[in-house]
Image: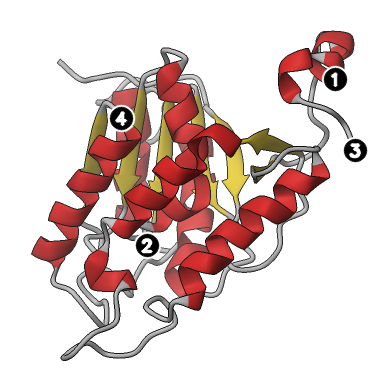
Amino acid sequence: MTEHFDVIAFGAHPDDVEAACGGLLVQLVRRGYRVAICDLTRGEMASNGTAEEREKEAEAAARILGVQARFALGLPDGNLRAEDPAQRERLVLALRRHAPRLILVPDAAARHPDHIAANALLRQAQFWCGVSGLLREVPVVQRPVLVRTLDFHPLQPSFVVDVTDVLELKMQALRCYRSQFEPGPGRTATFLNDPAYLRRIETNARTYGQLIGCAAGEPYAIDGPLPLADPVAALLDSNTGARP
């Protein structure tokens, strides 16, 4: 029987999701939502670490975040292509089988070409998962809400989530990826294993947290205005913390 999830967080490579939305995932699990992570590739093209090493690191990180499942689609690292119908169909099948209500995807304003392609592929899949003319043998599902996560470039958020209480767990999950973030003998020096990289993750959290009057925040964006049935409850909820 196929598992259904409330939320699936998609990343092009193992460790992408942790950096973008690890704090939110911890909070969602604690609130009783069924949450999964989907890595589009195994990260086999990385300058450091094998696909097997990264798989073990990803499993350890998922345990820290507490998500119910993590799976990899095995698409080609370094060759994600939005114009490839086969790749698009793999994602459509994933959405139909797991029927998420919300998907978290990389923002298109990215540094890595795979992240840009992942955004485009997931936008297509979000649409086509609800069209019965494609892959007729698999029933369509209601299209999930698509939410963009912070990538390389600053994100103009539709909303910011207070992750103050779970920031350290997010950083613990990221530190599971020793092959990527730890410099050392025999390892290629990269943008990721410069010690400044993980510090930037924390700095971003502090910066976006300041926007909503808390110590640490994660930014998220949707296309168009954010619909609110009850703006009083949404804007004045005491659990959101003090406003600047």
Nearest to N terminus: mark 2 or mark 4 = 4
Between tags 2 and 4, which lies in front? 4
Q: CA distance from mark 4 to mark 1?
A: 29 Å
| Residue with the mark numbered 4 | 66
Residue 100 at x, y = what percent?
42, 24
Direction from residue 234 to residue 171 in the image, left or right = left
Q: Amino acid at mark 1?
A: Leu
| Residue with the mark numbered 3 | 244
Mark on residue 235? Answer: 1
Q: Amino acid at mark 3?
A: Pro
* Residue 181 in sight here: yes
Q: Amino acid at mark 4?
A: Gly
Callout 2 environment at 10 Å: few (<14), some (14 to 19), or many (20+)? few
Q: Are marks 3 and 4 in contact (CB under 8 Å)?
A: no
Callout 1 environment at 10 Å: few (<14), some (14 to 19), or many (20+)? few
Q: CA distance from mark 2 to mark 3?
A: 46 Å
Between tags 2 and 3, which lies in front? 3
Q: CA distance from mark 2 to mark 4?
A: 33 Å
Instruction: Look at the image and tell me in which quarter the C terminus lies.
Output: top right
Mark on residue 168? Answer: none
Q: Helix, strand, or loop for circle 2?
A: loop
Nearest to N terminus: mark 4 or mark 1 = 4
| Residue with the mark numbered 2 | 84
Residue at 29 percent of width and 54 percent of height: 86
Q: CA distance from mark 2 to mark 1?
A: 42 Å
